[in-house]
Amino acid sequence: MSDISEAYLNAVMSNVATVLQLKQWSFNKQSFENIAQNYFGILIPTILTGSSCEKNVKFSVVLKLAPTDERYRISGAVTVMFLREIFVYTKLLHKYREFQNLYAISPHFVIPKCYYVCSDYCKEVIVMQNMCVKGYKPYVGTKFLDLDHIIIALKSLAKFHALSYLLKEKNEDAYEEVKEYCKPLTEKSNKGYIDIMTDRLKKALKVFENTTYVPLLEMLEQKCVKLIESATNSTKSLCLCHGDMWMANLLFQYKDDIPISACIIDYQTTRICSPAFDVLYLIVSSTSTLLRKEHFGQLLDTYYQTFEQTLSQVNLNSNGIYTKDMFQYDLSIVGPACLIAANTSTWLSSGLQREGHVRSKIILNTEREMEEAVSKYTIIIKNIIDDLTNYGYLKNVFE
């Protein structure tokens, strides 16, 4: 991915300073301690200082920039993703903030401030509040979230979904606009991404060759489009979902080393879908099989209770919108789609994707490193398959 020139960065920061009405401004680029580059863009933390109303002020911001080299635009996908995220930050989350203030929702769904956006082709940028300065940071303890972190994450996700249903109920025009920008994932809306998921299933078949998992993986590959689209067209209810809800897209705030709040980030794949997809994908992609075996029911209850309570705060009844029975039914429908997505992200995060426009950030230099990465990937996917099978969430693969 191409570097961002100093001239371009100066031009962006000049626009930000103008919007914030700063005089005699300057900026300094910072670096993230734990956050890696975004797969479909470049993240640059920056401190902007200047004077406003004869007072010295300072803004800690993050610039999220699209690649300026057209070779990395991936057949239009990056352009669409940035336009979608710009819409989410400038319009959708603005509405959510208004709802939270109007209905005195407590605790709030955490929304970073958005200071400036540009949607010009190959110049897309979002300048937002750096939540790390507010004490939010990524979880870096282990490969998976522990119980305290996944509970906080599910509560935040439940509030996000509840606000989507509130928008759907109270502002039909705004929700129609959401549907235009955040279309469901289908072969028509994003064939390239589905092709990637199908390719990763083919890679999984090679890894799992001569095992009992081959028939399932073969059916997932053959029916990939149908199973992905079923998360929208065969479920009981739809709302605006995050679409890529896993631990890398969460920042946590702590008190005495205990997580007390979560901030969801990276809205490039936000789309209309069943809320059950976000929930199940978060759980299977971001927790260990041991934690799931001990707490799976508790995790589902935590999500739904928070969802129900948040709706109650805005005078909506979950029984008329999305009942727990509907939620349970949808979980059984979205299971295969969650497995397909988890296989794709696990292959990438394990360092195994070494070709194409989107490559793993982990660089495997030796055959031993490659073998270890394949072994870890295999264990993770095997555990996800076994757990989803035990929950009864993969039955429709063979139907």
Image (tube, grey):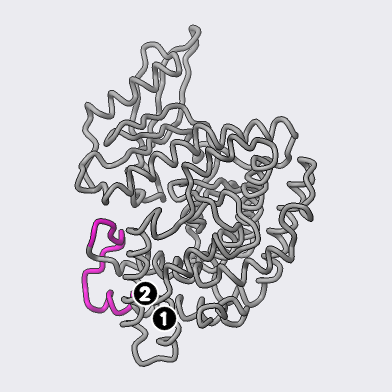
Taking 266 as reference, is 170 above or below it? above
Q: Which mark identifies residue 217? A: 1
Say if mark 2 contacts mark 1, CB within 8 Å: yes
Taking 184 as reference, is 58 above or below it? above
- Give the residue displayed 43% in from the left and 41% down from the top: 84
Closer to the camera, 318 or 36?
318
Instruction: Residue 326 in the image: state x and y as whole percent.
Output: 70, 64
Taking 69 as reference, is 229 above or below it? below
Closer to the camera, 295 or 311?
311
Is residue 361 rendered magenta in the image?
yes
Taking 155 as reference, is 226 above or below it? below
Kindly identify which residue carries mark 2: 201
The secondary structure that dominates the magenta segment is loop
Which amino acid is tagged 1?
Leu
Q: Quadrant of residue 80?
A: top left
Instruction: Residue 181 in the image: state x and y as whole percent.
Output: 46, 42
Local packing at callout 1 (Cα closer than 10 Å; few below 14, some 14-19, many 20+) is: many
- The magenta span reads 356-373
Is residue 324 rendered magenta in the image?
no
Instruction: Residue 3 in the image: state x and y as whole percent.
Output: 22, 41
